[in-house]
Image (tube, rainbow, N blue to C red):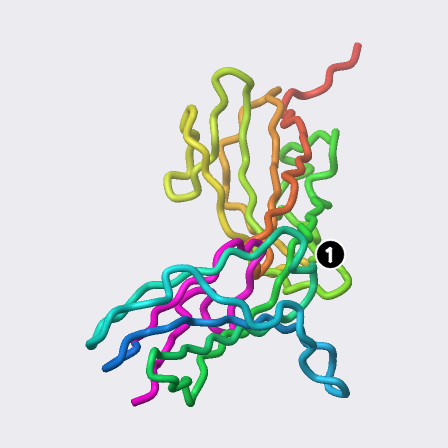
C-alpha cells in the first residue's frame, strides 16, 4: 500500500506576501512513514514551464511507526528563496519503510507578491475650503498595485476625522462623529474609486482629514495617505 501526503499550507491557488513554513500531513499506512520530501518550482512561462528552485528535500516530523498513523510535517523555507511577482508550485512526496513511494503527489500553486500598492486622493483637494456653496459630496481618488507582476487590487478604504487629541471619526452608520473610534469604510471601485457622502454634519471652521488606504490580493497594504480641508460657512463682510 503506497503512502499518501497532503499539503495543508499554502492553500492551492492562493496569493501570499509571506511564506516561511510549508505544512502538511502524511500517512504511511501499514509499514509506516520513512520520509516526506518537498520540491519547490517557479513558473518560467508557457515555453519552458516549471523551473526547480528547491529540489527534493526531507521535511521535519515525517516519519511514523507501523500502522494507520497520520503525522503533521513541516518544511521551513529559507530567506531569499521566494522572489516577488512569481508563481510557485510546491509538491510533496511520501515514502514508507517498505520502499513504496506515493503514487499521486500533492501539489499547491501560489502567487508570491511583496510589493505594496499605492493610493491617492484627488477630492477633497488638499488645503481647500468647502462650504454650502462649494459642497463636498464625493470623495474620490486612484489606486494601483505596484510591481512588475502584481497580484491586483483587492479594495480601497477611507476614513474621515477631525481634531487632534482627542480625534473624532465619522461613522456612516450613525451619520455622526465618535471620539477615539476609528471608522474605515470600503469605497466603490479600485483603480479609480469614489465614495458618495451623505449630508454630513460638518463643523464650521473645523479642519477635517480624509485618509485613504488600499490592499492588494496578496495582503499587502498601501501606506496611508491623507488630504485635509476646512469647512467654512462664515459669510464674508464688507464695509
Left or right position of 193 against 65: right
Region of the chain picked out in magenta, as a range: 1-27
Q: Is residue 230 above or below residue 6?
A: above
Residues 5 and 42: in front is 5
Q: Is residue 16 above or below residue 174?
A: below
Image coords of residue 211 (percent x, y):
61, 38
Image coords of residue 6 (percent x, y):
38, 75
Quadrant in which residue 237 is drawn: top right
Left or right position of 101 against 33: right
Identify the residue at horizontal 71%, vertical 29% (top origin).
129
Identify the residue at horizontal 62%, vertical 23% (top origin).
207
Residue pushed farthest front? 98
Q: Secondary structure at mark 1?
A: loop
Residue pushed farthest left? 67
Left or right position of 167 against 54: left
Quadrant in which residue 109 is drawn: bottom right
Image coords of residue 21 (percent x, y):
48, 56
Circle 1 packing at 10 Å, graded few (<14), some (14-19), many (20+), is some
Amino acid at each position: 500500500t503506497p503512502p499518501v501526503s497532503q499539503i495543508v499550507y499554502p492553500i492551492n491557488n492562493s496569493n501570499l506576501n509571506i511564506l516561511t513554513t510549508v505544512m502538511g500531513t502524511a500517512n504511511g499506512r501499514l509499514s509506516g512513514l520513512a520520509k516526506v520530501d518537498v520540491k519547490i518550482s517557479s513558473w518560467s512561462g508557457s515555453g519552458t514551464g516549471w523551473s526547480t528552485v528547491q529540489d527534493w528535500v526531507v521535511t521535519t516530523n515525517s516519519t511514523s511507526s507501523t500502522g494507520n498513523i497520520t503525522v503533521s510535517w513541516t518544511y521551513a523555507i529559507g530567506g531569499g528563496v521566494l522572489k516577488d511577482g512569481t508563481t510557485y508550485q510546491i509538491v510533496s512526496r511520501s515514502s514508507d519503510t517498505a520502499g513504496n513511494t506515493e503514487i499521486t503527489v500533492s501539489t499547491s500553486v501560489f502567487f508570491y507578491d511583496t510589493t505594496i500598492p499605492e493610493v491617492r486622493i484627488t477630492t477633497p483637494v488638499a488645503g481647500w475650503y468647502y462650504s454650502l456653496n462649494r459642497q463636498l459630496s464625493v470623495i474620490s481618488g486612484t489606486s494601483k498595485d505596484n510591481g512588475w507582476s502584481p497580484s491586483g487590487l483587492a479594495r480601497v478604504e477611507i476614513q474621515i476625522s477631525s481634531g487632534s487629541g482627542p480625534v473624532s471619526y465619522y461613522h456612516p452608520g450613525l451619520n455622526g462623529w465618535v471620539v477615539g473610534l476609528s471608522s474605515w469604510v470600503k469605497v466603490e471601485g479600485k483603480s479609480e474609486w469614489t465614495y458618495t457622502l451623505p449630508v454630513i454634519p460638518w463643523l464650521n471652521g473645523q479642519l477635517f482629514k480624509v485618509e485613504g488606504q488600499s490592499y492588494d490580493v496578496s495582503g499587502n497594504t498601501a501606506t496611508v495617505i491623507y488630504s485635509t480641508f476646512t469647512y467654512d460657512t462664515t459669510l464674508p463682510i464688507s464695509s
